[in-house]
Image (tube, helix red, strand yellow):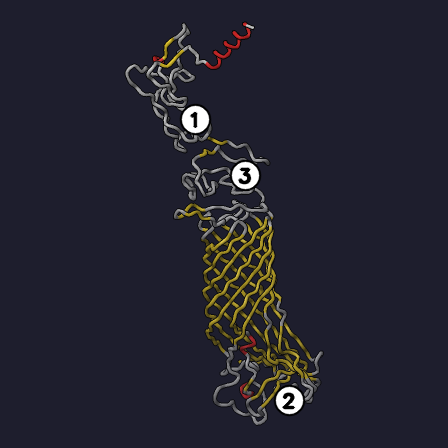
Amino acid sequence: MRRVLLGGLGIALGVFVRPAGAQEVPGRPAAPYNSPVPKNPTVRAARLGMPVAIPDAPSTTEVTPAGLIARGQLTPYAPPVGPGTPAATLLPVGGQPVGPSPLPPPRQVGSGPSVTEVRGPVPGGVPVGPPVTMGVPTVGFPLITGGSPGEPGAIPGTTVIPQVGPLDCGPGLPCPQPAVDAPLYGDPVVGGTPHFPALRRLVGCTDGRSWVSAENLMWWTRSTQLPPLVTTSSPAFNGIPGLGNTQTILGGSFGQTLHGGARFSGGYWFTDEQRRGIDASFLFLFRNGNQFAADTNTYPLLARPFFNVNTPVGPFAEVIGATGLAAGRVVTTLENSLWGADVNYRRFLLGNACFRLDGLVGFRYLNFTEDLAITETFVRTPGSPMAVGVPAIGGTVSDRFRAANNFYGGQIGLTGELRRGRWFVNGRSTIAFGTVHQSAEIGGGQALVFPNGQIAQFQGGLLALPGANIGHFSQDKFAVMPEIGLNLGYHITPRLRVFTGYNFLYLSSVVRAAGTIDTTVDAARIPNFPLAGNPAPLAGVPRPSPQLRTTDFWAQGINFGVQWTW
């Protein structure tokens, strides 16, 4: 029982009685637990023979959580210095003495060593170029500048990363095949604002600064409208319009209007950015001939009608050939040609990686020329009465009409292109305003063979007569000439492509060869044309008179072409 009481007393003293190893000096209060003031080792005294505890050196800094970003960096604690207070020196791991000085300021971005990135080859064996040094990125602007540092267009302070895949190949590097989606290229910062015109739409190196193209044209032109030029009838009506069964066999719409031709185009960009440039084109349609021929083997009577203003006044006709009188033939030939050229200043307006739209301002020239010839020949039937008609055994009568139109004008327009991988669609629309110089040349003649074998030539035919409309005549008219074209094409290689398309060209004012013909005639002016009573030519304005009747003109058709860019 005594042993139990003694054991309990010892336990109570160990738990509830303050340890006697050290006590505060009387007259000095104990420091709080979290007080920043360190406990003074000199205020402790040994009691009951217990050893004195030697305290650790006071810490000069507070504990700060470690990490990449310091959260609430604290000012290091500096212990008070006074009499009897020993100086403390911290020796961190590594053995270098650390004083109570504050931490150094953070390092500025970009002031340290640079990092060199060396990329391996692109799959497929396309090299990516020399190593590129990483610098300070520009916030809010793409790192791909489209140029190396020091080159035109490079942005100072930006990082140039080698392109991988179907982007801008760069100088001296092979060009990949066209890709489905093209990159967006940026221009240098202008006025502190980045620009993204996206001028290189397909692959950076596919679009060079120069291009040429050649096209095969299959165009149709507007047909001409002829006045009644050849008629037929029974012998009793002599082919005079409005009498009996007379019918017109040549008149109205005439001619096969399909033309073959070619167009050659080219252009040049003043800069690699393809903002400003020049383009030009030259086109022509081959001369197209249309012919009408008729003879007395097919039509028993052939005649050339006109309206006579002399006696007898009214519809009249010259008989070429008839059964029992003469064998005759008439040939009418119509030929026309078209050619022109334009040159334009070209300026980029808007676009993105797959589309662009350019404006055009330039000069346009177009020439349209047409010739119409009417030639009749006859041979008198042996035994026919010489008193009927001209007293000749044969002969040729011809009229020739030529019209030329030269358009000169200023031109404005738009041209655009949309790309999707190897395929592309482009269009062009222009309108030119200017003057068309219109001219007409009219001539005619006769060559007659008389019974004595003499051949005589005379100026003037039937609708082209001397002292009336034979000669050269001209006028100037204001005209408008719009043109549109649309092409669908495919890139065979990054620089070679083929295309096909449709074009429509319109000119508001032209003179056609048929528009120079006057079918109102003073028959007394026709050489070797006998009239009852032999009347004299009428005074006043001679007929036929020169005519310059205008109409509009169009040409349209399909084209097949090829283009090379470098």
User: Upstream in the sequence, badge 1 or badge 2?
Assistant: 1
Query: What residue does disc 3 label?
Result: 164
Query: What residue does disc 1 label?
Result: 64
User: Upstream in the sequence, badge 1 or badge 3?
Assistant: 1
- Quadrant of the rendering where the N terminus is positioned: top right
How far, Cα to Cα, is label 1 from label 2? 134 Å
Q: Is residue 6 above or below residue 299?
A: above
Q: Is residue 293 left or right of residue 130?
A: right
Q: Is residue 95 above or below residue 68?
A: above
Helix, strand or loop status at disc 2: loop
> Where residue 65 sits in the image (x, y, percent)?
45, 27
Give the farthest residue toward the left. Answer: 83
- Residue in the foreground of this view, choosing between 428 and 73: 73
How far, Cα to Cα, is label 2 from label 3? 94 Å
Q: Is residue 383 visible?
A: no
- Residue in the foreground of this view, choosing between 93 and 372: 93
> Where residue 330 sits in the image (x, y, percent)?
64, 78
Q: Specify few, some or many for label 1: CA neighbours under 10 Å numbering under 14, 14-19, or 20 or more.
A: few
- Residue in the foreground of this view, choosing between 404 and 379: 404
Residue type at mark 3 is: Val
Q: Are marks 1 and 3 in contact (CB under 8 Å)?
A: no
Query: What residue does disc 2 label?
Result: 388
Where residue 229 sits, quadrant-wise, is bottom right
Q: Nearer the viewer, mark 1 or mark 2?
A: 1
Residue type at mark 1 is: Thr
Q: Residue at x 39, y 48 (%)?
A: 191
Q: Is residue 491 left or right of residue 32?
A: right
Q: Is residue 540 left or right of residue 1?
A: left
Q: Specify few, some or many for label 3: CA neighbours under 10 Å numbering under 14, 14-19, or 20 or more.
A: some
Helix, strand or loop status at disc 3: loop
Residue type at mark 2 is: Val
